[in-house]
Amino acid sequence: MTARKLRSYFLSHPTVVLTNSPLGRVMTHAEVSGRMVKWTVELGEYDIEYKPRAAIKAQALTDFLIEMIQPVEEKVWRVFVDGASNLSGCEVGVVLVSPSEEKIKLALRIDSRVTNNEAEYEAVLAGLQAAREVGASRVIIYSDSQLVTQQVKGTYEAKNEKMLKYLGLITARATSLTDWSIEQIHREENAEADTLAKLAASNRNKHPGSSLFYPTDALY
């Protein structure tokens, strides 16, 4: 097939066929019969030399495969979250920091009565949602809430029904991520997210009927 399609090249240049089969001996043997005679006659007009294929060293092949399939490491997004509650509802601040150190800031508000711990859970949910929206696959969530971070990690046991529901929502929302974790930080290190949560509260006081953002999967 190759000789027919590339006949002009086969006629103009010598051809070397690398093979580990006894093809050369078969094709050049005088006592060929049947279809082999036809193939021998057809290929006889070309200058073809048959050589054994050199073995590829195993380590060279292994190194090549490792180089070709080496995955590109996905960069990590950092997400700082903070939540606060008051008589009129819940405010959340989220700061997303991209691998190139660019920041996206969100001030969110939920018009439902929650406790302070529940507000911190809402902040984690909002942070995961925001990370998913920007296409992040590897995420580290930073929160200054010891209870929430330790319950999400499994260090503290969650017995309250609301806390268990929040843990279920967090697990479900994180399924779209390749890898994620949550870490506790000091309140001073979470100042930007805290300021954004206060901004959401300020907007509530100025515009009681408006909402900057309403996260999905709310419990209320």
Image (cartoon, grey):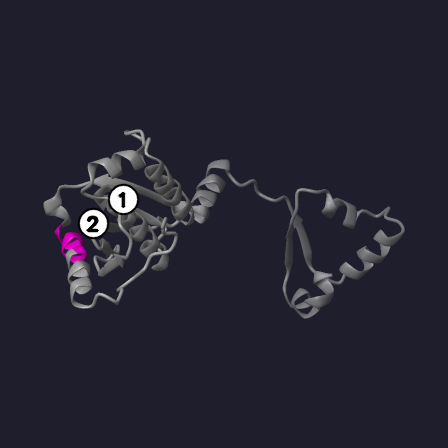
Instruction: Determine the residue positioned at 80% across, 47% down.
Output: 29
| 125 left or right of 38 in image | left
Residue under label 2, please give it.
Answer: 85
Residue drawn 25% across the image and 55% down it? 96
Report the quarter where the N terminus lies.
Answer: bottom right
34 and 45: which is toward the camera: 34
Query: Local crowd at mark 2 within 10 Å, few (<14), some, or many (≥20)?
Result: many
Residue toward you, 112 or 123 = 112
* Residue 171 belongs to magenta span: no
Q: Secondary structure at mark 1?
A: helix
Give how far across and how far down residue 91 sits, in percent.
22, 54
Q: Please name the amino acid that badge 1 sits on.
A: Glu
Residue 161: image location, x then y, percent: 36, 36
Q: Residue furthest front?
A: 87
- Provide the major secondary structure of the magenta segment: helix
Magenta-drawn segment: 191-197
Q: Residue furthest bottom?
A: 8
| Residue in the image at 85% along x and 57% along y | 38
Left or right placement of residue 91 versus residue 35 in this view: left
Q: Tell me whether circle 2 and circle 1 mark residues in contact (CB < 8 Å).
A: yes
Residue 111 appears in view: yes
